[in-house]
Amino acid sequence: MAKFKKKKSEPTVDPIDSKNEPVEDLPVDVPRKEKSEPMPEAPSEPSVSVAEKSEKDRKLNQLFWLRVALAIIAGISATFIFEGIEGEERRWASIGFMIGIFFATVIVAKSMKMQLPSADRKKVVTQAIGSYVFLYLFSWIVSYTLTHLGDVGSGVNL
């Protein structure tokens, strides 16, 4: 901290008098601060043991791979389930099927009884959602293309 000098003179009424008086500068002793240890912040959430954390990670990993496997299986099966539907209805039926399967995995994830902190509660829904959607669409498109490879109306000529 900077040390300030204190003026040792009587206050004057007239401003002209204050310019003529000598000012005595004396250093002021500033009390030193005691060094304090930083206070540990109270954790907002209870500490999680290593076993609980590994159990949570294991269940989230299972949920991830469950959704990846179901996306591939559901994408391939959508090709055959909705074979009888033509045009735009087939697309919307397949997307509805994809959303339905995803909600089923959310119910399965809730039944796994994962002990997640309050900040991670939405991980049950968001875990592998991008992988699920893209793998479903990829496997649906590839399986549809491979099953209709020889069709003349599809535009693919062999």
Image (cartoon, rainbow, N blue to C red):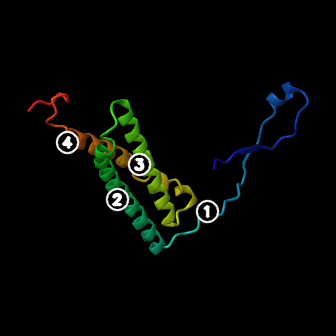
In whole angstroms, how far apart are the C-alphas of marks 4 and 2?
26 Å
* Residue that appears at 35% across and 48% down: 131
Q: Quadrant of residue 50?
A: bottom left
Q: Which amino acid does label 3 sit on?
A: Ile
Q: How many marks?
A: 4
* Dot 2 alpha-carbon crowd within 10 angstroms: few under 14, some 14 to 19, many 20 or more: some
User: What kind of element bears circle 1?
Assistant: loop
User: What kind of element bears circle 2?
Assistant: helix
Q: Position of residue 74 (x, y in %)?
A: 33, 50
Q: Name the residue under label 1.
A: 41
Q: Where is residue 127 in the image (x, y as percent from the top left)?
A: 43, 53
The front one of 36 and 20 is 36
Q: Name the residue under label 4.
A: 147
Q: Name the residue under label 3.
A: 129
Q: Which amino acid does label 1 sit on?
A: Glu
67 versus 21 height, above or below: below
Q: Name the residue under label 2.
A: 65
User: What kind of element bears circle 3?
Assistant: helix
